[in-house]
């Protein structure tokens, strides 16, 4: 009987190997919702069948998180980069400790994986990217995918894609840690991207940065590439607020709290947590003027751009002074150019590209070497204090194929927001 081989190393082994939005949201939650409790759940949109024993090996990996602490050198690095955060928050990060008992992992007889997380919101918010990174790398390891591409191949892939985008004057950032093939390949891709940035005219203006805090540190130390650490918030920020206070004013409250804590920093808002209508109703002239722009993460790019532009104009705000960051799972560079050419007529477009860089490797004929997982971890329930009852958390994006959560709650929210 063949035995599946699993990684014999700790996959997630650097505390800051996660998206910046985790720190930003944690800061707001600590201040505003210190006793709020959240349930999170793993969703595999591809309904993947995982090898036998995958859950047990994942548990071993999760148990290893208890030993992971921030390094002082990286704390010093982010203290300079994340100037908008107070000193006490950096001290808080040095004391943070993962608690594996917050994570429940199971696998059914057909091989489907389930992962759930429960605990204080500010504490459990750190699990999302590390668990997704671990699952993804374990999966690609078991499938032999990591043997199909060398470090040099990954470097060239990153260099070629970044060069193409720079030469076409596309402004972009790398958002690929959550569903990457592996940490090592991610690092090599970023090395190639940084080489393009450092050697091609206009590279600094086009390749803006990375969402991965640790890899921004690596890029500066090892690749002589001083990247912006990119990111503001995830959907859970808005969807949890909706579950706590109701959907009608959730976006408005989310924007108000964001401004309260970050003033004029981190000015990109994520509008597709609680329906298009819910956002548009709450998007006031004050919000339109005080936020630098919006991140588009679901729905047709041209159609949503038109709606945002019309809303800005309705509010008396010039959309050409505002940014839209497009991050809706691009895998085709020609589509990126197409959207950019359309959007630049109305706004300042930019792109957040994830698996496109870190898990979309091609052979010489342009065929994918392997397919990445379509996996997410989303908040599914929240309560204001440990003594309350949980409320359902739902995500109602512009593209309902990406909706997540209790169907009755989704129906109720939609009724409230459209009547």
Image: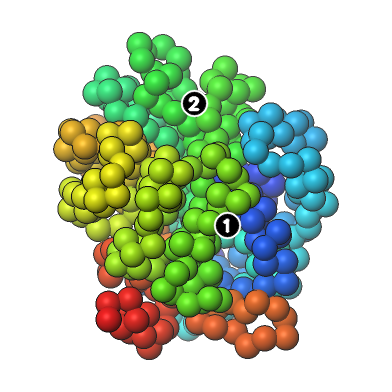
| 10 Å crowding of disc 1: few (<14), some (14-19), many (20+) | some
Give how far across and how far down residue 391 sits, in percent: 54, 83
For the residue pair 122 and 103, the one nearer the viewer reads as: 122
In the image, what residue occupies the spot 46% across and 44% down?
A: 290
Q: Secondary structure at mark 2?
A: helix
In the image, what residue occupies the spot 72% across and 66% down?
A: 34
Is residue 299 toward the left or the right of residue 112 in the image?
Answer: left
| 10 Å crowding of disc 2: few (<14), some (14-19), many (20+) | many
Say if residue 107 shows up in the picture. no
Q: Earlier in the sequence, mark 2 or mark 1?
A: 2
Are circles 2 and 1 on residues that touch, CB within 8 Å? no
In the image, what residue occupies the spot 58% across and 43% down?
A: 263
Res 361 → quadrant: top left
Indicate how the structure is coloured in the image.
Answer: rainbow
In the image, what residue occupies the spot 49% across and 56% down?
A: 255
Say if residue 164 shows up in the picture. yes
Give the vertical position of 94 relative to 100 (above or below): above
Quarter of the image that includes the C terminus: bottom left
Q: Which mark is residue 191?
A: 2
Q: Nearer the viewer, mark 2 or mark 1?
A: 1
Give how far across and how far down residue 214 sits, in percent: 62, 38
Give how far across and how far down residue 1 sits, in percent: 50, 71
Give how far across and how far down residue 178 sits, in percent: 49, 52
Q: How many marks?
A: 2
As measured in the structure, the alpha-carbon distance from the residue carrying label 2 to the one carrying label 1 is 37 Å
| Label 1 sits on residue | 257
Q: Secondary structure at mark 1?
A: helix
Is residue 276 toward the left or the right of residue 101 in the image?
Answer: left
Is residue 295 toward the left or the right of residue 123 in the image?
Answer: left
Q: Which mark is residue 272?
A: none
For the residue pair 62 and 379, the one nearer the viewer reads as: 379
């Amino acid at each position: 009987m063949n035995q599946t081989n699993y990684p014999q190393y700790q996959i997630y082994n650097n505390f800051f190997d996660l998206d910046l939005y985790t720190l930003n949201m944690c800061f707001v939650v600590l201040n505003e919702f210190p006793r709020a409790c959240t349930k999170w759940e793993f969703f595999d949109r591809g309904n993947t069948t995982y090898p036998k024993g995958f859950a047990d090996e994942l548990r071993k990996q999760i148990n290893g998180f208890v030993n992971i602490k921030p390094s002082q050198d990286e704390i010093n690095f982010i203290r300079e980069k994340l100037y908008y955060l107070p000193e006490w928050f950096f001290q808080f990060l040095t004391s943070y400790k993962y608690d594996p008992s917050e994570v429940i992992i199971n696998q059914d007889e057909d091989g489907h994986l389930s992962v759930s997380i429960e605990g204080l919101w500010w504490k459990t918010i750190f699990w999302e990217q590390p668990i997704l990174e671990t699952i993804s790398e374990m999966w690609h390891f078991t499938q032999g995918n990591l043997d199909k591409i060398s470090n040099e191949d990954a470097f060239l892939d990153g260099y070629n894609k970044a060069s193409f985008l720079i030469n076409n004057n596309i402004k972009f950032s790398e958002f690929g840690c959550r569903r990457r093939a592996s940490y090592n390949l991610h690092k090599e891709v970023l090395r190639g991207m940084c080489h393009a940035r450092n050697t091609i005219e206009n590279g600094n203006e086009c390749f803006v940065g990375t969402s991965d805090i640790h890899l921004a540190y690596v890029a500066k130390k090892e690749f002589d590439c001083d990247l912006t650490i990119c990111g503001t918030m995830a959907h859970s920020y808005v969807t949890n607020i909706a579950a706590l206070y109701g959907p009608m004013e959730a976006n408005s409250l989310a924007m108000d709290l964001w401004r309260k804590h970050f003033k004029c920093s981190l000015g990109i808002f994520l509008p597709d947590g609680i329906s298009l209508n819910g956002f548009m109703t709450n998007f006031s002239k004050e919000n339109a003027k005080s936020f630098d722009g919006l991140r588009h993460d679901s729905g047709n790019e041209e159609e949503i751009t038109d709606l945002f532009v019309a809303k800005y104009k309705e509010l008396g705000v010039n959309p050409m002074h505002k940014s839209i960051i497009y991050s809706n799972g691009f895998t085709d560079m020609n589509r990126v150019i197409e959207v950019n050419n359309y959007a630049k007529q109305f706004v300042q477009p930019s792109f957040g590209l994830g698996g496109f860089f870190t898990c979309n490797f091609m052979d010489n004929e342009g065929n994918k070497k392997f397919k990445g997982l379509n996996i997410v971890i989303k908040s599914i329930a929240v309560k204001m204090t440990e003594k309350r009852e949980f409320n359902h958390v739902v995500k109602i994006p512009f593209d309902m194929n990406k909706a997540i959560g209790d169907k009755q709650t989704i129906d109720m929210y939609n009724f409230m927001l459209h009547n």
